[in-house]
Amino acid sequence: MSCTALILADDPAYKRTLATLTVLDRLVISTHKAGLDKIQVIHTGNPPKLTRTHALGIKVEILNKIPPFKEPTLLLAGNLTVRENDLIKVIGKRGRLYNHNREALPCGITTEWRTNFDTSLPDLPKIETQGTAKVVKDGLTAIQAEDALWDSMGLETDSFIDQNFNRPIGRFVSKILIHTPISPNAISVIGTSIGVLAAWCFTHGEAPLMVLGALLLQASAIVDCIDGDVARILHKETHVGKWLDLGGEQLVHLCLVAGMAMGLHRLNDPSGPYLWLGLVAALGVVLSFLTILHAKQSKTPLPKLNSFITRNANRDFSALLLVFAIAERVHWFFGVAVIAVNGFWIYGAWLHKKDASEEAI
């Protein structure tokens, strides 16, 4: 459906900042991400501050009065915070957005302006928000909106440890880093470096260093949550950043199994099987990465494979490794890891074949 976005920036609250970006800046970006290229902002006086909008190259037309409507229009208040997924639903169903308390929000599809939002958006299908949607009126509502925005930064793919440990701890750091010039990609590189350092600790085969390695690995997992939080809340997600994050994670896995194999070889009988098992584990990591890579780049639906990857491709094992390292039973963990990484790609290959067979029917 062809649709224009018309944002009324007449309430000064649109200037309030949420995690360094103004409310209006965030709204324009969300509108653009919802698929609307024609965005008009009604504002009198000096042009509003749209720092991130301009950095992303999003075109916005600033007008001093409401123009005649030539097509269905997404009407929005400039002091509204809303996620793009909710806007997509409003556009698709030609409705009006409501909050969780079933209160109407200044957001909906209309064909004409009639004095105010309530008269301009009458009797439309009710679309209840699934994300963060709030009208910012003052300092208190701005704080509430920012808190809700941070709470929405998690991913559906977050594991149990991510939800209850890594992301909550990392959130404190994220709130500091958004006020610095440090980029999400730089944070990703730092996280990967910490993970590689963790693997190096395991190569020595000494119990205290193995515990340190497990702690560093957990820190790397926390940093992995931080880079995503910072990228999403500042709208700095990039294609390069996604691959940097994925590639860095797999590099850490590869170094980790190699480091554990070398350390256990030194710690135990040098004639033992650890180096050979390390080679098998490393091969499993590479093949598992190729399985994930294929799923991400596939042009055909792979529902079973993608669901399996979402549920299992995480770093929850880092907490388990810490327990085994403290108990000086890293060799137990290593044995399970050899089986797990190879089981991952073998089962993934079977799911891919199953998905392909069902698609062909």
Image (spheres, grey):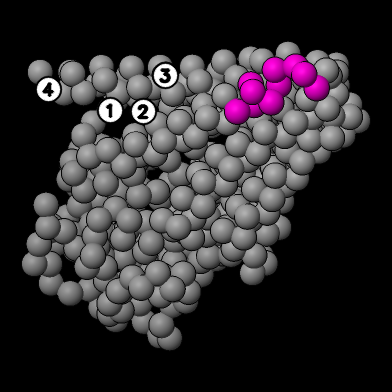
Mark 4 Cα within 10 Å, few/some/many (few <14, many 20+)?
few
What's the CA distance linking mark 2 and mark 4? 18 Å
Q: Is 169 drawn above or below residue 191 in the view shown?
A: above
- The residue labelled by disc 2 is 306
- Residue 360: mark: 4
Earlier residue among tags 3 and 2: 2
Which element carries disc 1, helix, strand or loop? loop
- The residue labelled by disc 1 is 302
Residue contact at pointers 1 and 2, CB within 8 angstroms: yes
Residue contact at pointers 2 and 4, CB within 8 angstroms: no
Earlier residue among tags 1 and 3: 1
Can residue 284 be seen?
yes
Residue drawn at x 55%, y 39% as measured from the top left: 250
Which element carries disc 3, helix, strand or loop? helix
Farthest-out residue, front? 271
What's the CA distance linking mark 3 and mark 2? 14 Å
Closer mark to the observer between disc 4 and disc 3: 3
Camera-side residue: 320 or 109? 320
Q: Give the range drawn in magenta.
A: 270-279
Residue contact at pointers 1 and 4, CB within 8 angstroms: no
